[in-house]
Image (spheres, rainbow, N blue to C red):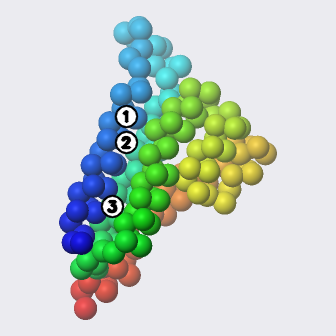
Amino acid sequence: MRKGRVEAFSDGVIAILITIMVLELKVPTGAGLGALQPLVPILLSYLLSFVILGIYWNNHHHLLQIVDSVDGRVLWANLHLLFWLSLIPFATHWMGENRFAALPVAVYGAVLLLAAIPLSFVDPRLALALYVLVAVMWLVPDRRIERTLAR
């Protein structure tokens, strides 16, 4: 199978996930800035998850640049990735709605497959800081792939 089908399917799934997340954002009832105050944790959760999904999407395309064709193993690995990514909207919403409580932050970490999950029960803010740090680290795709492609 050609890689284009995997890319197109993955693009579609990630686009749907971002759409689901943005549709979960509720409009405040008031017109002033104060009406946004209760939504700050929800908006921050959305922002973090949007960036993380963008990072996955960007790096997914980077990795597939060096692939000519895919086999069953790649298809199943890609489905595994998409399964976990598909849980991001749920975890994002739960975490934001509960103002970064320990269990929702831990579930978010489990979805992201981070080793810092137990830290959520010690201090959810530290766990969130690690999630943001990982997102920042992967914001720029691995340059080794670009160097390999340039050769």
Please tell me the numbered disc located at residue 32. Answer: none
* Image position, residue 24 (x, y; %): 41, 27
* Image position, residue 127 (x, y; %): 66, 49
Residue lying at 61% horizontally and 54% vertically, measured from the top left: 130
95 or 130: nearer the viewer: 95
* Tag nearer the camera, 2 or 3: 2
Residue holding disc 3? 58
* Image position, residue 123 (x, y; %): 74, 43
Distance between mark 1 and mark 3 Cα atoms: 19 Å
Regarding mark 1 in the picture, which secondary structure is present there? helix
Question: Where the N terminus falls, by quadrant?
Answer: bottom left
Hey, which quadrant is residue 74 in on the image? Answer: bottom left
Q: Are marks 1 and 3 in contact (CB under 8 Å)?
A: no
Hey, which quadrant is residue 22 in on the image? Answer: top left
Residue holding disc 1? 20
Q: Amino acid at mark 2?
A: Leu
Residue 50 appears in the figure: yes
Q: Earlier in the sequence, mark 2 or mark 3?
A: 2
Distance between mark 2 and mark 3 Cα atoms: 15 Å
Distance between mark 2 and mark 1 Cα atoms: 5 Å
Q: Amino acid at mark 3?
A: Asn
Q: Earlier in the sequence, mark 1 or mark 3?
A: 1
Residue lying at 40% horizontally and 51% vertically, measured from the top left: 53
10 Å neighbourhood of mark 1: few (<14), some, or many (≥20)? some
Residue holding disc 2? 17
Q: Residue furthest top?
A: 30
Residue lying at 28% horizontally and 79% vertically, measured from the top left: 66
Q: Are marks 2 and 1 in contact (CB under 8 Å)?
A: yes
Q: Residue furthest bottom?
A: 151
